[in-house]
Amino acid sequence: MTTLRLALLNAAYDGEQTRRNFRRELDASLAEFHLPEGEIPETFEYDGVVVTGSRASVYWDEPWIGPTKAWVAEAIDRGIPHLGVCWGHQLLADVLGGTVDDMGDYEVGYSEIEQLEDTWLFDGIDERFTAYTSHSDAVVELPPGARALAANQYSNHGYACGRVFGVQFHPEFDQRTMTKLLNNKDLEPAYREHLLEQVTAENHAKARPASLVFENFTDYVRELQASVDDDPDAVRTDPTDVSA
């Protein structure tokens, strides 16, 4: 199996837990860049890019967000496949011309999500599935040409646009992460306790299939890389469409 080299754009302000989760889930050699500290890749020598979640909003005037958008835009133009999770899902949509805004609500905990079409990105995941969520911003308008792949009553939860894929839910979360998140959030005490009571091994097992998006994405990137290795002079073309 080919070892992939992925750029992991870690947008979490406290990046340790995010680093642990993504390194557990991604079967690849990861070059990590902690975006809030101003770390931006200096080259585009990567097979793919993964953009993590963050407590930031993509429309904030943070000094690191503009340079991140500029690098990502060029990486997309170069044909490098991208996967964005939560904030990353929103950032990629913004870069591609979609609209991200405060949705006036906060979706947190275990959520039910429905696939909108049959897609290889969700191979092994039920048509209606459970996933960890934590967001108050949402992609309210998809980028031009994007296809909606998943949603629930709160927002879009998945899209594809060329070689760019976004999921609003958190396929990388584990019980430890969700417990820490809930304890650190400004929540009404009774509501916090209710949510913490749901962080069980049984519910975690229900949410685990959602993490298959990582395996499915890396398989896709390997197929792309194999097509380039077979003909290095060829213009990169997708070996597979987003549909199953």
Image: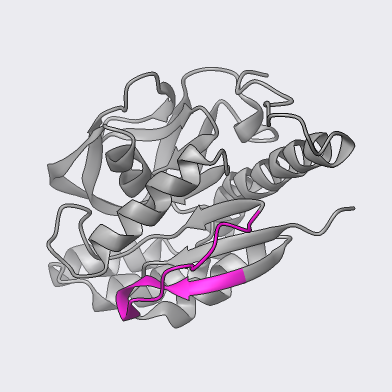
Q: Height in image: 211 above or below 177? A: above
User: Is 2 placed left or right of 54 in the picture?
Assistant: right
Q: Height in image: 174 above or below 128? A: below
x and y percentages locating residue 217 in the rendered image: 65, 43
Q: Is residue 169 visible?
A: no
Q: Is residue 217 visible?
A: yes
Residue 181 magenta: no
Identity of the residue drawn at 52% across and 75% down:
19
Identity of the residue drawn at 50% across and 62% down:
173
User: Is 114 placed left or right of 31 in the picture?
Assistant: left
Residue 42 magenta: yes
Identity of the residue drawn at 32% across and 27% down:
143
- The outermost residue toward the front is 233
x and y percentages locating residue 159 in the rendered image: 44, 30
User: Is 236 placed left or right of 31 in the picture?
Assistant: right
Front residue of 207 and 91? 91
Residue extent of the magenta highlight: 31-46
Identity of the residue drawn at 70% across and 43% down:
221
x and y percentages locating residue 6 in the rendered image: 63, 59
Front residue of 73 and 83? 73
x and y percentages locating residue 15 in the rendered image: 42, 78
